[in-house]
Amino acid sequence: MKADLFTKTMLAIIAVLLFLNLISGLLPARQAVAQQDAGPVNRYQISAWAASIGTYGHHSGYFVVDTVTGKVVDKKEEEHSLTPR
């Protein structure tokens, strides 16, 4: 008897959620509005990379590009050796 009540309750909740989903699809959606005075958003792009040199080690690095001017702001390259020195 308890399992039957739980099943009916869960099915009722699922039915209500499906009905709300149907109703929300019929309502008109609001248009997105961009912020005008947000400042310099998404100005810099940061990219990192790494490459293996087989069993000897790997190279890695990063660079930062100013997307407004197109100039590289910062960059760094490193070689990591796995052989003992």
Image (tube, helix red, strand yellow):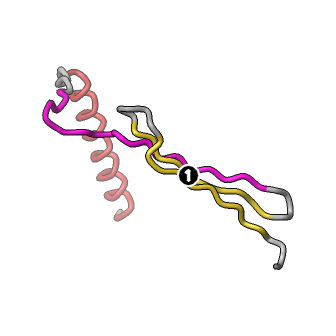
Q: Secondary structure at mark 1?
A: strand
Question: Residue farthest to the bottom?
Answer: 85
In front of the other: 80 or 74 = 74
Can residue 53 be found in the magenta stretch? no
Relative to 12, residue 61 above or below: below
Total labels: the figure holds 1
Comparing 17 with 72, the one in front is: 72
Quadrant of res 19: top left
Residue on which disc 1 sits: 62
Disc 1 crowd rating (10 Å Cα; few below 14, some 14-19, many 20+) is some
Q: In x, y percent, where is residue 17?
A: 27, 40
Residue 79 placement, left or right of 26: right
In this rendering, position of residue 59 left or right of residue 5 = right
Q: Residue at x 67, y 53 (%)?
A: 50
Residue found at x 77% / y 68%: 81
Q: Quadrant of the N terminus?
A: bottom left
- Position of residue 36 relative to residue 49, above or below, is above
57 or 36, which is in the foreground? 57
Q: Residue at x 34, y 58 (%)?
A: 6
Q: Quadrant of the C terminus?
A: bottom right
Left or right, 70 with reference to 34: right
> Which residue is outermost to the left?
37
- Residue stretch rendered in magenta on the structure: 33-52
Vertical position of residue 47 compared to residue 81: above or below: above
Q: Amino acid at mark 1?
A: Tyr
* x then y, percent, for residue 25: 26, 25
Query: Where residue 7 sits: x, y (%)?
Result: 37, 54
Q: Is residue 36 magenta-colored? A: yes
Q: Position of residue 79 (x, y in %)?
A: 71, 61
Q: Where on the picture, by quarter, is residue 69?
A: top left
